[in-house]
Amino acid sequence: MSNKTYTYNAELRVETGTGASRRLRREDKVPAILYGADKEALSLTFAHKDMIKAQEDEGFYTHILTLNVDGEAVEVILKDIQRHPFKPKLTHLDFQRVDATHKFQTKVPLHFIGEEIVTKAGATVVHQLTEVEITCLPKALPEFIEVDVSKFVVGDSVHISDLTFPKGVSSVDLAKGEGHDQSILTIKANKAAPVEDDAAAAE
């Protein structure tokens, strides 16, 4: 896990509802909610420019974040992010508190390596999943899970059960039973170029 820290300033907001959220967005702020850890949910606001910059970093989605809320440092994970359908704007954020002594669920990205080797061999890697849901203590949260596809050949497939999870990290899907062992990727042969006619093929 990276030693980089992710800390953001938040303001408590009293007014809630659609109208209040619209006013905040006009003021270039992003409404948000903070919940979890058996504590009261809090309505927050962030400077839009700070969140736009933050969401460009993959770590914003995969690390434990620290929110400075009314002078208190709160450790959280990002649970949901809502964007404007066509403008480069964030419209709402959901954060969940984390407790160092309790496991939590979140999703982490899959990083695929060795795809260029498969491609050079005349095959294509077809992805079914790009992230997996895990459960772990906050200190065990990985930035990503690596998938090496360089040794796979046409016809092979990779499932969640084939992944190597870090110590203290387990799959939410596998805990549900074998029927939830989803396919992550398959290796398929590239389609051959079409032959114009039999005469050309013979030549």
Image (cartoon, helix red, strand yellow):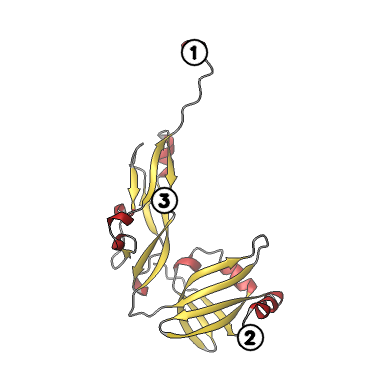
Locate residue 183, reporting x and y percent: 36, 50
Circle 3 residue: 112
Circle 2 residue: 15
Residue at left 59%, top 84%? 11
Q: How many marks?
A: 3
Mark 3 crowdedness (10 Å alpha carbons): few <14, some 14-19, many ≥20: some
Residue at left 55%, top 72%? 93
Which of marks 3 and 1 precedes in the sequence?
3
- At mark 3, the secondary structure is strand
Can you say whether 39 is above or below 140 in the image? below
Question: Who is closer to the viewer here, 92 or 28?
Answer: 92
Compute the Cα span from label 2 to label 3. 44 Å
Residue at left 30%, top 57%? 164
Compute the Cα span from label 1 to label 3. 41 Å
- At mark 2, the secondary structure is loop
Can you say whether 40 is above or below 122 in the image? below
Q: Relative to residue 49, is residue 118 drawn left or right?
A: left
Compute the Cα span from label 1 to label 2. 74 Å
- Amino acid residing under circle 1: Asp
Mark 2 crowdedness (10 Å alpha carbons): few <14, some 14-19, many ≥20: few
**Looking at the image, is mark 1 or mark 3 nearer the viewer?**
1
Which of marks 3 and 2 precedes in the sequence?
2
Disc ID at residue 198: 1
- Amino acid residing under circle 2: Glu
Locate residue 199, reporting x and y percent: 51, 10
